[in-house]
Amino acid sequence: MRIATWNVNSVSARLPRLLDWLSNTAPDIVCLQEVKCADDGFPAAEVGELGYQAAVHGSGRWNGVAVLSKIGLDDVRRGLLDEPGYHAEGALVETREPRSIAATCGGMRIWSVYVPNGREVDHPHYLYKLRWLDALRATVTKEMTPERPLAVLGDFNVAPTDQDVWDTTAFVGSTHVTEAERKALGALRDAGLTDIYPRPLKYDVPFTYWDYRAGAFPNNRGMRIDLVYGDERFTAAVTDSYVDREARKGKGPSDHAPIVVDLEL
């Protein structure tokens, strides 16, 4: 079985690349983030021609997540338990953004997540990020069961260690690397999940994100912020995992590369 996760940074802008990648890589389950479309705007017919059912949680031009599956798509859940909202500047009410979706596929419980960015350490979005990660931990803890493997895949917007960024001095005082964010990832591990560390295919560290600017990708100035966290049964079944760096190349790519995980269940 093959499972993948990819922040596509707009499914409409990346659709030809996505369809080509799905055809060539042939994952059974795919978690997508930043689809940037409403549910009815997702290209379900196009991915359906490749054999995928789609469950989508989106609202328009920002955020949005999806799960694609060739092996069943049941018990779909949109959003976390007690999920916090974000009170944007100038907004009258707090809104809950479309950042998580779960489905049971082939007997496995799969979550696709797009963790809030946090923006700046002293910004309200940073506190929202920490609250959101705590809700993720609580949700996953409640959903874990010995009867089925569980995995949480997606763009976590957190580099787990200093080795997961190209230059620690470039991130002093920034989000994505703070102790509080990394402690939140540690809480997921304490809950019984393991970080599935992928092969990089090139270079030493399996970065998954490179800024579009200043030649970051060709110079490998990246970050490992797209992650796969699995419970004991999921982790024990993993036979291989890699970052598909080739998908970041060429004209008009996402600024993220997919992670591919192979399992024997």
Image (cartoon, rainbow, N blue to C red):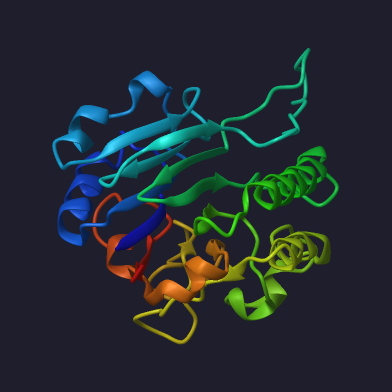
Report x, y in % for residue 114: 56, 45
Q: Is 138 above or below relative to 79?
A: below
Report x, y in % for residue 217: 41, 68
What is the quadrant of the N terminus in the image? bottom left
Q: Which residue is depicted at the point 57% across and 37% down?
A: 99
Furthest toward the top, the residue is 92
User: Residue 2's quadrant in the figure?
Assistant: bottom left
Furthest toward the bottom, the residue is 204
Near-viewer residue (29 or 182): 29
142 with respect to 30 (left or right): right
Near-viewer residue (240 or 145): 145
Q: Is residue 221 visible?
A: no
Q: Is 18 above or below relative to 160?
A: above
Report x, y in % for residue 83: 72, 34
Q: Which residue is depicted at the point 72% across and 62% down?
A: 191
Furthest toward the front, the residue is 147
User: Residue 41's quadrant in the figure?
Assistant: top left
Q: Which residue is depicted at the point 70% across and 22% down?
A: 95
Near-viewer residue (209 or 111): 111
Q: Which residue is depicted at the point 20% across and 34% down?
A: 48
Q: Is residue 135 visible?
A: yes
126 with respect to 80 (left or right): right
14 with respect to 257 (left or right): left
Near-viewer residue (92 or 3): 3
What is the quadrant of the C terminus in the image? bottom left
105 with respect to 143 (left or right): left
